[in-house]
Image (cartoon, rainbow, N blue to C red):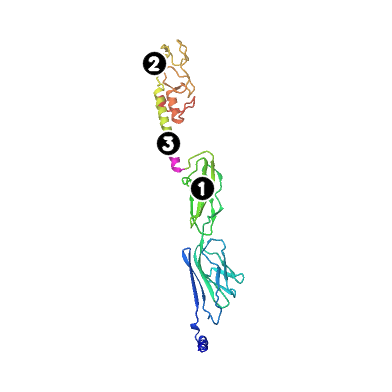
Amino acid sequence: MIPFLLLIVCFLFPIFPSLYPTSEYFVISGQGTKPNIDFCTNSADLAMGSPFRPVWFIQPTDQFVELGVGFSMELRASDPDGVDDWWISSGLFSITPIDASTAIVRNISLVLVGVYDVEVRAFNPSNDYCSARFLITVQDTTAPVFVTAPESETIQYGESVNQLLVAEDLSDIDDWEITNNNYYFSINYYGRLQNRRTLSVGRHSVTVRVTDEYDNSRSASCTITVTGTPFPSNPLFLAGYAVTIVFILLVCILLLIRSRRDSSPRSEPVTRSKRGVYQCQDCGLDIQGRRIGKCPGCGVKPGQCIVCHTTVEIGEMYLNCPHCQKLAHRSHLLEWLKVKGVCPFCQRRLRKSDVV
């Protein structure tokens, strides 16, 4: 009876291979933001093929890599018949066999910042494989690098600061800013450093910070030294300054004129007592004659006209300069002041109102 049953089994198994037991194994391991699903399959007929499948010797795990740094990851799987082939799902990465159980995963080109879901498989000669999924996270934590940093310089008062700064980063440059002296300095989106207003004489420290799109930043400082004599260059300030000076000068001139007018002596004629008789202004003596060089009583000469250079006769109207007290014929001095406006003797400014 038993040999008969064995004969039936041997006859049916080759016809119905689906009756053979197959094996499929799933291993779920959690790491990172998504669980890794690792599974190995063997669909070969136990009676007709190898019952073995590749297994991971080094379990693939989630990876983190810096932007711009080459990515490299070693994979190892074992199989009694050896690992015959490797496969990777992402076109950004390649997988290169090293030996019968080892392969290396590398990036093909520059991989941008992001999270990449990658699946890899290791095949044996029977086309059975083990598979693993993991995440490759590319991040940027590197600060920009100054190619042209701010430079210290010495300028003259009134000159401007104009520096073009350059920074490099694998990500985009997002912002430029002044961190310590925004009152005097500014910097635009393209990295041009300039002064907002005229710099005062002295030393001015300025710190510039450049930031990429992932908030990585780097700072650099310089000192601007301003020399020379300050002089206002703002047109409005200059106009106000000039108006103030003119106003002060006008006030001073008016006060000076008023004080001179109050203190200047008035002209008075050499009086005549009666016809043909003249009175000396010093001693009061009556003198006969029209042209007398000096008074017989006191011996004082009336003086010489500073305009016509002739003697001022007794009885003639005269004026004297309030600055030098020199005499002049009244009519002569008034005509002179109409043309010249200064004293003929001392050359100081003189007006009609100062002597009349």
Query: Which of the marked residues, 3 or 1, is nearer the chain's N terminus?
Result: 1
The crowd level at tag 2 (other Cα within 10 Å; few <14, some 14-19, many 20+) is some
Q: Residue at x 42, y 36 (%)?
A: 244
Please state the horizontal and vertical placement of residue 102, each as a whole percent of the image. 59, 69
Q: Position of residue 271 (x, y in %)?
A: 39, 16
How far from the left and from the top, in percent, is residue 243? Answer: 42, 37
The outermost residue toward the right is 99
Q: Are marks 3 and 2 in contact (CB under 8 Å)?
A: no
Question: For numbered disc 3, what is the local secondary structure?
Answer: helix
**Is 239 a magenta residue?**
yes
Between the C-alphas of marks 3 and 1, the distance is 39 Å
Mark 1, other Cα within 10 Å: few <14 / some 14–19 / many ≥20? some
Would you say the residues marked 3 and 1 are in contact, meaning their CB atoms lie under 8 Å apart?
A: no
Label 1, secondary structure: give it.
strand
Amino acid carrying label 2: it is Arg
Q: Is residue 182 above or below residue 284?
A: below
Quick check: can you spot residue 194?
yes
Q: Which mark is residue 207?
A: 1
The residue identified by callout 3 is 244
Q: Is tag 2's residue or tag 1's residue first in the polypeptide sequence? A: 1
Q: Which residues are magenta?
A: 234-245
Distance between the alpha carbons at the discs numbered 2 and 1? 91 Å
- Going by the numbered disc 1, the residue's amino acid type is Thr
N-term mark: 3 or 2: 3
| Secondary structure category for the residue under label 2 | strand
In this view, the residue farthest toward the front is 1
Query: Which secondary structure dominates the residues rendered in magenta?
Result: helix
- For the C terminus, give its image quadrant: top left
Q: Position of residue 108 (x, y in %)?
A: 56, 67
Please indicate, yes or no, whether residue 89 appears anywhere in the rendered image. no
| Residue type at numbered disc 3 | Thr
Location of mark 2 (residue)? 272
